[in-house]
Amino acid sequence: MKQRFLGRTGLRVSELCFGTMTFGSGADEATSHRMLDAFTEAGGTFIDTADMYGRGVSEEILGRWLKGRRRDELVVATKVFATMSDAPNAGGLSRKHIVSAVEASLRRLGTDHIDLYQTHVWDATTPVEETLSTLDTLVKAGKVRYLGASNHSGAQLQKALDVARARGWEPYSCLQPVYNLLARQAEWELVPLSAAEGVGVIPYSPLQGGWLSGKFRRGMAAPPEGARGSGAWNDRNTEETWRVVDAVLEVAEEAGRTASQVALRWLLQRPGVTAPIVGARSVEQLTDNLGCVDWELTPEQLQRLTSASERPLPPPYDVLAYYPGREPRTGPRTDFS
């Protein structure tokens, strides 16, 4: 598995990130540890969790696996925001909650530092200066190495970057958005903004809850039993979805790959993407996902998938796409009529 730089930083991460949301729920501890073994044996170094996953259980399972391993060879990411109790300050991005949350995550993970600490969602109730200044102190204290954001709009991410730059605080170096062949809205602002600002992009839900895994196929009258994306059946059962699914399955057959591998490979080859986050409930499922590395889709296959997944842009993105830019001026303007 290749290593890529995380945005503009000098931090190298594996081109796939292993997401641990299933730990303790979809996968028991023994299975979770076997999946971590398989991921690292394949060259993976980047692992993502969150304090809200299983209300801390995911971090605990990961922490027990980390014992006895070479901690400096791994990049461990977690997140802060979740309300962990009914107490008034038990959630959000206030200074009080962040300081309490990072200490709790460090205890559950059994480590003295977190490599990438991410705000799980924008907090409209807390001044961004309070959040960012607190995060900056965690970096300076050595408890956190890098900062990231998840579930932010383009305007929110830009504001956070601008405030950090103006105050000389540690900026966000990473963004975790939803991004896949069925959800490409991140391309409207977030991906180009991240590229311009040197922010790495680690997409979550790269298979859209299993819709791009090959389990869902045109002609089904109902979703597959037990499939994770079943709850979205009424919204996803559309011609637009099946057009994408058909294209993924066609390319998969052509390339001798699984649908999951093709959907993940498309994302790996998109501009600005650092490392898609893959999750799994079994070693077999993870192994299938890991098969997206060490090969490439052809330009024609990439274009076929991209074309099948394109949707009409809403204003103002439709206008901006029509007028992408102008040729630079070659001299001073003299005609003002």
Image: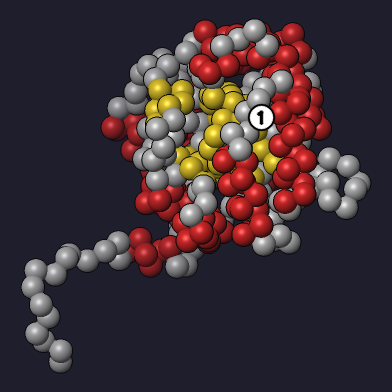
Query: Can residue 217 be seen by looking at this rendering?
Result: no
Residue at point 73% right, 31% down?
105
Q: How is the image coloured?
A: secondary structure
Describe residue 91's horizontal placement relative to residue 70 as left or right: right
Q: Which residue is mark 1?
A: 49
Percent x, y for residue 17? 53, 26
Residue at left 48%, top 54%? 168
Q: Is residue 332 above or below residue 1?
A: below
Q: Residue furthest right?
A: 86
Seen in the picture, residue 30 relative to 89 is either above or below; the reply is above
**Residue at position x 60%, y 10% in the image:** 69
Provide the secondary structure element on which disc 1 rests.
loop
Q: Nearer the viewer, residue 23 or 9?
A: 9
Which image quadrant is residue 76 in? Answer: top right
User: Which quadrant of the rendered structure holds the C terminus?
Assistant: bottom left
In this rendered view, identify the residue nearer to me: 25 or 10: 10
